[in-house]
């Protein structure tokens, strides 16, 4: 039943526990995470339990895809990521990112159906938003803190500058790219990292030249 939901939502590639939705500018990923016996024992669930992870990979970042499927990123390789929280009270496993299934699988249909409804009402909406480059760039421009779910790297970080700038260039929003790199220079965390500061300055000089030429 989840397969049909994803198929109807535009997902076209499926393998084992992952599905991909391909667009011109991005790739959406949904991954059903399994737990081996050791991990299951540590987090207090069973090997039948699962997690639901969402991701969006932006083609313009040209970030390497290292998995076995060279054109399909793993959720962990995406620039935008979110764990789908269950919102279902499970006393045996209160951790919100783990969908608990009993050792004998007696509640599997109930849990899978609830996960399907969460994907339909929250997961697909989240992905639709982040597949839009303009929306994604606006999220990179947000500072960390309250009200920011940090599904992407926040402004002031090197990751936000690198990934956000790739999207900004694609959209022709060079002023935003300049702001992202300026925030790196203002971040005290990087003040003693000479290579990062040099990189930020080079990027700012290049962006400034492009802005003058435009």
Image (spheres, grey):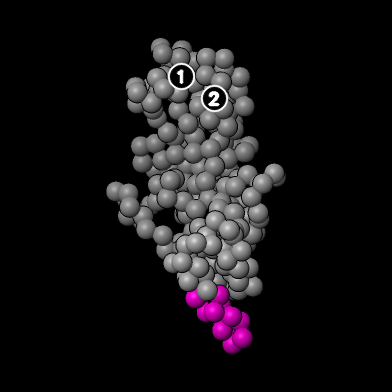
On screen, residue 213 versus residue 14, left or right, reads right
On-image quarter of the C terminus: bottom right
Q: Which residues are magenta?
A: 202-214
> SS of the residue at dot 2?
loop
Q: Position of residue 62 (x, y in %)?
A: 42, 63
Q: Residue at x 39, y 36 (%)?
A: 17
Residue ID at (34%, 22%): 37
Please name the residue that numbered disc 1 is placed on: 44
Secondary structure of the residue carrying tag 1 is loop
Observer able to see residue 205: yes
Can you identify the residue that label 2 sits on? 95
Q: Is residue 4 visible?
A: no
- Can you name the residue that lies furthest to the front here? 192
Q: Main secondary structure of the magenta part?
A: helix
Q: Position of residue 9 (x, y in %)?
A: 54, 45
Is residue 177 rendered magenta in the image? no
At x 54%, y 56%, the residue is 189
Query: Residue visible at 39% across and 43% down?
Result: 14
The answer to whether marks 2 and 1 mark residues whose Cβ atoms lie closer than 8 Å is yes
Q: Where residue 100 sits: x, y (%)?
A: 49, 21
Splitting the image into 4 quarters, where does residue 47 fall? top left
Q: CA distance from mark 2 to mark 1?
A: 9 Å
* Number of dots carrying numbers: 2
Question: In the current view of this chain or complex, which residue is farthest to the right?
Answer: 147
161 shown above or below 144: below
Say whether disc 2 or disc 1 marks the residue closer to the N-terminus: 1
Q: Is residue 206 magenta?
A: yes
């Amino acid at each position: 039943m989840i397969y049909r939901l994803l198929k109807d939502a535009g997902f076209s590639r499926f393998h084992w526990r992952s599905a991909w939705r391909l667009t011109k500018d991005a790739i959406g990923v949904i991954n059903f995470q399994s737990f081996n016996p050791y991990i299951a024992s540590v987090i207090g669930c069973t090997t039948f339990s699962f997690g639901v992870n969402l991701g969006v990979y932006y083609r313009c970042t040209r970030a390497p895809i290292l998995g076995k499927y060279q054109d399909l990123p793993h959720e962990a390789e995406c620039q935008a990521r979110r764990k789908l929280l269950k919102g279902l009270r499970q006393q045996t496993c209160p951790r919100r990112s783990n969908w608990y299934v009993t050792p004998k699988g007696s509640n599997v249909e109930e849990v899978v159906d609830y996960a399907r409804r969460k994907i339909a009402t929250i997961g697909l909406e989240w992905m639709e938003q982040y597949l839009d480059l303009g929306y994604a760039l606006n999220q990179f421009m947000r500072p960390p803190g309250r009200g920011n779910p940090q599904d992407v790297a926040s402004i002031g970080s090197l990751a936000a500058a690198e990934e956000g700038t790739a999207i900004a260039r694609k959209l022709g929003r060079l002023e935003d790219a300049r702001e992202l790199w300026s925030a790196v220079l203002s971040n005290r965390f990087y003040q003693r990292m000479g290579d990062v500061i040099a990189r930020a300055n080079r990027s700012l000089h290049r962006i400034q030249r492009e802005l003058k030429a435009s």
